[in-house]
Amino acid sequence: EPEVTQTPSHQVTQMGQEVILRCVPISNHLYFYWYRQILGQKVEFLVSFYNNEISEKSEIFDDQFSVERPDGSNFTLKIRSTKLEDSAMYFCASTASGPTQETQYFGPGTRLLVL
Amino acid sequence: DAKTTQPTSMDCAEGRAANLPCNHSTISGNEYVYWYRQIHSQGPQYIIHGLKNNETNEMASLIITEDRKSSTLILPHATLRDTAVYYCIVRGSQGNLIFGKGTKLSVKP
């Protein structure tokens, strides 16, 4: 069964460093999402991406964040200068088509720890 | 976007049916109800979704009231592996999922 994969599973970084989280969505999917979950809190939407551009973003997704699909398979989330409060689980999700009706399938997540 | 209300926690005996309720009284006519679950800190796992009619798949059944203001997720024979946080979600207008705190289901032997 096809699934969303994410690398790395764990990332430890120093405050102020740049990190890139990688996701490989399900192969025929067209819409991509990033969510995050701070320990003990709710899963929060960050950004959605379609046709090589951002469709929607939350207020969390500020100028420190960026997304791209560099090679037609990977979907990346970059945090330019990490802060302590960026420590969280980051989940990628994808859906085949039509953002409002198709089911989103999530990857296993990347645990980011900023020291 | 519609808001959902779920009990904070529930217990269920292994082998029995788990019935997880959800209120979504402000749901609009074209909004779907989705159920996901999250085991520990793993990625949310899709369970089932529906619009108006009751739905069933290999994991669960979804019962939606006629006025669509509430629904119930049914796990027919709960196992210890079904212990998780279950989220009832009404899809956001832009397609993003808006997670609440969910119901922590504990399946006990």
Image (cartoon, coloured by chain):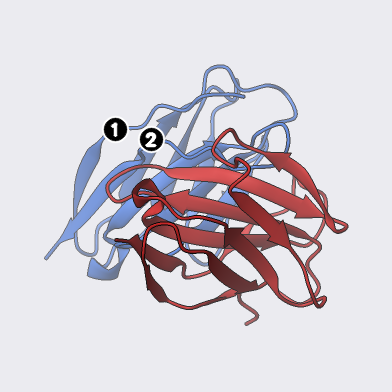
Q: Is residue B58 above or below residue B2?
A: below
Measuring from the top left, give residue B64's x and y in whole percent. Answer: 55, 34
Nearest the eye: B2 or A30? A30
The quadrant of the rendering that contains the C terminus of chain B is bottom left
The quarter of the displayed image where residue B32 is located: top right
Q: Is residue A73 above or below residue B100?
A: below
Nearest the eye: B21 or A52? A52
Asked which secondary structure carries label 2, the reply is strand
**Pointer 2: what residue?**
B21
**Which amino acid type is shown beneath numbered disc 1?**
Pro
Chain of the residue where label 2 is placed in the rendered structure: B
Question: How crowded is the residue under tag 2: few (<14 C-alpha within 10 Å), some, or many (20+)?
Answer: some
Disc 1 to disc 2, how far (Cα)?
7 Å
**Pointer 1: what residue?**
B7
Nearest the eye: B108 or B85? B85
- Answer with mark 1 or mark 2, whichever residue precedes in sequence: 1
Image hue for chain B: blue
Mark 1, mark 2: which one is toward the viewer? 1
Chain of the residue where label 1 is placed in the rendered structure: B
The quadrant of the rendering that contains the N terminus of chain B is top right
- Please give the name of the residue rendered at 78% of the width and 72% of the height, measured from the top-left corner: A70
**Which amino acid type is shown beneath numbered disc 2?**
Pro
- Please give the name of the residue rendered at 36% of the width and 46% of the height, measured from the top-left corner: A85
Nearest the eye: A13 or A107? A13
Q: Residue furthest front?
A: A16
Chain red in the figure, letter: A
The quarter of the displayed image where residue A89 is located: bottom left
The quarter of the displayed image where residue A107 is located: bottom right
